[in-house]
Amino acid sequence: NDYQTLIHLLTPSNNQYTASAADVQKSKTYLEKSWFQLGYCFARLKDPPEAIAEYRAKAIKSFDYFIANYAASPLAPKALSLKGAVQMEIRDPNAAKTFDDLASKYPQSDEGKNALFSLVRSASEIGQLEQARTAFEKMAGNPGVYSVDEFVRVGQALLDAGLNQEASQAFAHVVAKSEDRNLLERSLFGLGSAHFALKNYGGAIKALDELMTKYPKSGLFYDAK
């Protein structure tokens, strides 16, 4: 409510805070941030539950306004990323386009670099499996853009969603590229789990044997055995 009040007060036709050039610039800055925060608030509101659909629609509308009017803002990539997350939440099929726009318009931003990663994880979590599979194929086709840590997190999301073939690819990438115990331990267990679900028992045994050999005191010892 306060952000909506602030937007009303700072809209140029209503703005009383224009005594100096510095005030005008401050007003523009605060107005820009207020539009972003308004969208963020609508994206997070959950009470009352029956109003959630209305809140999410208002979030998308606020982010659309922000992106249209403040495309050069450092907050613009984050606004697009949040819009995509809201669209995923409400199962809007346009979410994939939003993440594509994010990657193409702001390729140097953290959000732009991680657009496909965000899409894979979000789609996996809400059960949009075909969208998750397609996004992961794009991500796997350009692995140098993503960190091994991101492949671990995507692998786990895919595994949890039952996309075992894609999960095995994600974990295998980490096993081939990393010596970091925190990542390798989880990836070997994930790889073994994915192979087991695929009934590739030889592959499962190989991954889990490697896990037990490298880390015999692993916290995953009992699950792996």
Image (cartoon, rainbow, N blue to C red):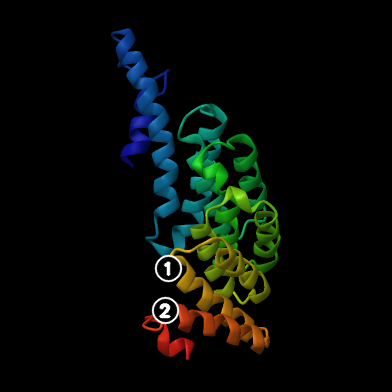
Dot 2 corresponds to which residue?
215
| SS for callout 2 | loop
For the point 58% across and 69% down, the residue is 171
Amino acid residing under circle 1:
Arg
Per the model, the C-alpha gap separating discs 2 and 1 is: 9 Å
Task: Identify the residue shown where x is 41% and y is 23%.
Answer: 11
Mark toward the start of the polypeptide (2 vs 1): 1
Q: Which mark is residue 181?
A: 1
Which percent across, then down, holds residue 3?
35, 37
Q: Compared with residue 202, is residue 1 higher up or lower down, i.e. above or below?
A: above
In the foreground, 61 or 71: 71
Task: Tell me which residue sits at (65%, 63%) in the image.
Answer: 132
The answer to whether the residues at label 2 and label 1 have Cβ atoms under 8 Å apart is yes
Q: Position of residue 72 (x, y in %)?
A: 52, 26
96 left or right, relative to 51: right
Mark 2, other Cα within 10 Å: few <14 / some 14–19 / many ≥20: some
